[in-house]
Each structure stands twice: as structure tokens, then as C-alpha cells.
Image (cartoon, rainbow, N blue to C red):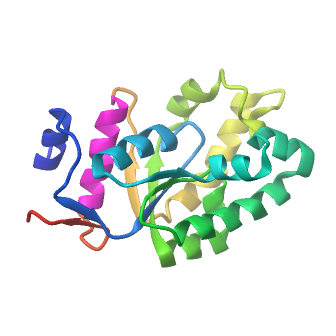
Amino acid sequence: MSGIEQTMADGEGKHQGYRLKKTVVLVGMMGAGKTAVGRAVAARLAVPFLDSDAEIEAAANLSVPEIFQRDGEAFFRKRESEVIARLLKQERCILSTGGGAFLAESNREMISRDGVSLWLNADLPLLWQRVRHKESRPLLRTPNPYATLAEIYRARVPVYEKADISVTCQPSLSIEAMASRVIAALAEQPDVLENQDA
């Protein structure tokens, strides 16, 4: 465990010594923990946390499953790209995106230009454990949701591997411990997270 991780594992709060220089865009599968871990990282670094799905829902006054049902996935993906572009232009933050957002090459280029992508890499058993009882996943509303999840996972992992930074998720780690891992990974990129105490 690095010094940074140990300090954070010991429960110390915000990191006034760090300055976020780029918006960090969290990418990965549904159930990887983008929202929970993203909130914890943002709190530690004293920067805003934003969620592209939440922003879309607020603008449409509908939930993501309702948008999928009413307007279809293509419509949702277009709105998603517009929202991510707008959020990347705002103040530096931690931005959580939906599982499919990083698949579009135009989104990847936009994220690379205006921020940095970080993949929360969770394996299939962990993802299934987290999403199997959730009704809020429109892509899993199929006769065999596990097979659907496995198919999505196999298709998306090669794309997620293109992210600038990768952090592996482990079932034994708490949200706070994962936040520590993420901050440690960001701190290795001084153009992303500057250690002002160094």
C-alpha cells in the first residue's frame, strides 16, 4: 500500500494538498461502482461530483429506463453525448458516465481532449452480484439477464481497455478503499492530479 493509500485508509478527510487539473470521467460496466466511488473521490478531493445519467434524467424529467422505453436507445445515446460534452466544459470534477457512454468513438475523443478517462475494472461475477436484483437496468430486461450481462461485458471490455487509466475493483474493498485506489492512480498522473505538497 502506498503512502497515499495508507493515509486515506486511515480515514483522513479531504486532500487540500491535491489540485485536480482535468475532469476525471469514470467509465465501466453497470455495477462497477462509478457513482458510489465517484462521490467518495470527489468528496476527498473537494471537487464537484456529476453523473451524466442523473443530468439526463433531470433534463428529461424521466428515468433512464423510461427514456429507453419511450424514445429508444439511439435517442438516449445522442442526449448522453450532448450532456457529457456540456459537463466537460464546466469546472473540473469527477464525472460518472453510463456503461455505454465510452463505446462511442466520438465520446472517447471528446473525453480524451477535455478530460481523462478512468476505467473501474470489475469482473463479471462481481458485476452480477451487484446488479442482479436491480430493476433500474434497461439492458438487462431480458429472459436471461446473466447471459445478457456476460454478452455486454465481453463486447465492452476491449473498449474500456482504451481508457487512460485503469483501476481494478475487488469485492473485499469498501467504497472508501476503492476511492483511495483511484486517487493513488490519479496521483501518478501529475497532469491530472497535482500534489501541491510534493
Establish if 30 lies above or below 96.
Answer: above
Q: Quadrant of residue 150?
A: top right
Residue appearing at x 29%, y 35% in the figure: 177
What main secondary structure does the magenta stretch of the protein show? helix
Please report the residue visible at 80 percent of the width from the left and 32 percent of the height from the top.
Answer: 141
Quarter residue 78 falls in: bottom right
- Horizontal placement of 165 versus 149: left or right? left
> Which percent across, then down, holds residue 36?
46, 37
Q: Residue furthest top?
A: 133
Say which quarter of the image contains residue 136.
top right
Of 100 and 157, the residue lying toward us? 100
Q: What x and y, as percent, mark residue 3? A: 10, 47
Location of the N terminus by quadrant is top left
Where is 195 relative to 125, above or below?
below
In the rendered image of this protein, does residue 149 appear above or below residue 42?
Answer: above
Count of residue discs: 0
Q: Residue furthest toward the bottom?
A: 113
As drawn, 98 above or below 159: above
Residue depicted at x 65% and y 24%: 132
Tell whether position 185 is magenta: yes
- Along the horizontal axis of the image, is 94 left or right of 182? right
In the picture, the quarter occupied by the C terminus is: bottom left
| Residue 191 highlighted magenta (yes or no) | no
Q: Which region shows up in magenta?
A: 173-187
Residue at image position (17%, 38%) is 12
Q: Position of residue 160 (x, y in %)?
A: 53, 58
